[in-house]
Amino acid sequence: MTTRVSALARLTAALAAALLLASPTAAFAEGENAVTWSVQPSTPQGPDDRTEFDYTVAPGATISDWVAISNFSSRPATFRVHAADATTDYNTAAFTLIGADQASVDAGAWTSVDSAAAVCADTNDAAERACAAGLGVTITLEPGSRADVPFTVTVPHDATPGDHAAGIVASFQSEAVDSTGSAVSVEQRVGTRIYLRVEGALLPKLALTGLVSGYDGSWNPFGGGTGRIGFDVANTGNMRLTATPAVHLTGPFGTDFGTVTLDPVTDVLPGGVAHVEALFADVPPLMLLFADITLAAAPASGVAAAQDAAPAVLTESTVAWAVPWSLLGTIAVLGGGTGTWFWWRRRSRQLLGFELAAFAEQIRTEERINRGASAPEHESETAR
């Protein structure tokens, strides 16, 4: 169903898009023909107060729902609306979706938008990528209009218990010019989340893996450096979890550099891994640093997660070398310079001794020559 969007709503969305470009419910394509649109949960009559889709169902269940696509632009725009599997971004720990040319195999593959195809054959080749790029439905919205689009989630009878995640996406394709002046096609995607829990045995479980420690020294031989403690937060269970990491850093003889409590890693999906790093500034190079890591988990947000139990607190330890390279280098330079000076001084004395000995020998030789030259003359005078 397509309806008109009020001018006030259009202005509000445009401002939201300009201020919150990373928002999951607004997007903005720059240029004279700017396109601004949103994706949000809806009903046949229009959007409701939900911010995401959150379901708890039994294996084999079918869910029917609606999603609203709104065009807040002053020009018509065509969107491809489809579902895609969700994952946890390794570098940012953010909820993200697989690429537009990747075929879904989990909740995204279970979700059909307006009865369109949602699954591609698993061939792992160009044919699969082309299929994935064509899934879903294409809709064209007039300026200021909205389409309420039905979709169906068909949960397999053998679906694994626990949490599954996906997103319904409206993608807009436009042309742009790259740094070389060549025309390129740009696809921008805006979506809303689907959290789906399949009933059955639940296992809340996290793991601390991939510990990496290091120390970045200062050029100042007497200054402190930066201690770096990195690790991966891996969800090895079947429930979405939020984790709060903390790192306590110490040095030799009980030197305490304090504790860094990092921002919570929210909604880590089952099978997801997020990399986290703690930084400690102004740490003196004491040769060794000892880091104790704790990871406190909590249930994720959402309707189903409200009653979840959290796993026990995890702890791990690691050691980092904090070698005072600048100081050692300075000592080496000074030591080398001092040693060179002493060597040069000793060598100079030796050379001076050699020169004096040679000069003395030269004088003695000249004296012998002079005595030898005067001896015959003296003998001749004596004979007369």
Image (cartoon, helix red, strand yellow):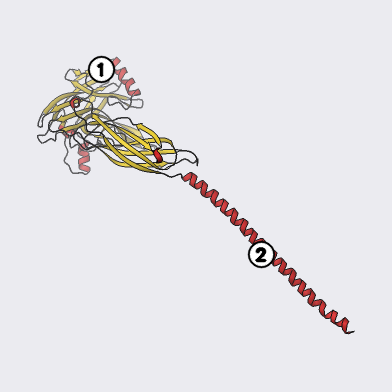
Instruction: Locate residue 236: give its quadrant.
Output: top left
Residue 354 badge: 2
Above or below, comparing residue 177 to residue 26 in the picture: below
Quarter of the image where the N terminus is located:
top left
**Would you place residue 288 above or below residue 302 in this image?**
below
* Quadrant where the C terminus is found in the figure: bottom right
Q: Position of residue 88 (x, y in %)?
A: 26, 34
Q: Earlier in the sequence, mark 2 or mark 1?
A: 1
- In x, y percent, where is residue 200? 12, 32
Q: Is residue 2 left or right of residue 73?
A: left
Of 132 and 49, the residue lying toward us = 49
Of residues 14 and 105, the one drawn nearer to the viewer in this rendering:
105
Measured along the vertical axis of the image, is residue 88 above or below residue 37? below
**Residue tagged by mark 1?**
5
Residue 119 position (above or below residue 323): above
Count of marks overlaid on the render = 2
Q: CA distance from mark 2 to mark 1?
A: 103 Å
Q: Count neighbours of disc 2 (C-alpha within 10 A) and say few if under 14, some if 14 to 19, many if 20 or more.
A: few
Choose top left, top right, bottom left or bottom right for residue 114: top left
Q: Position of residue 203 (x, y in %)?
A: 17, 34
Which-is-in-front pick, marks 2 and 1?
A: 2
- Residue 278, position as x, y percentages in the image: 36, 35
Residue 20 found in image quarter: top left
Amino acid at pointer 1: Val
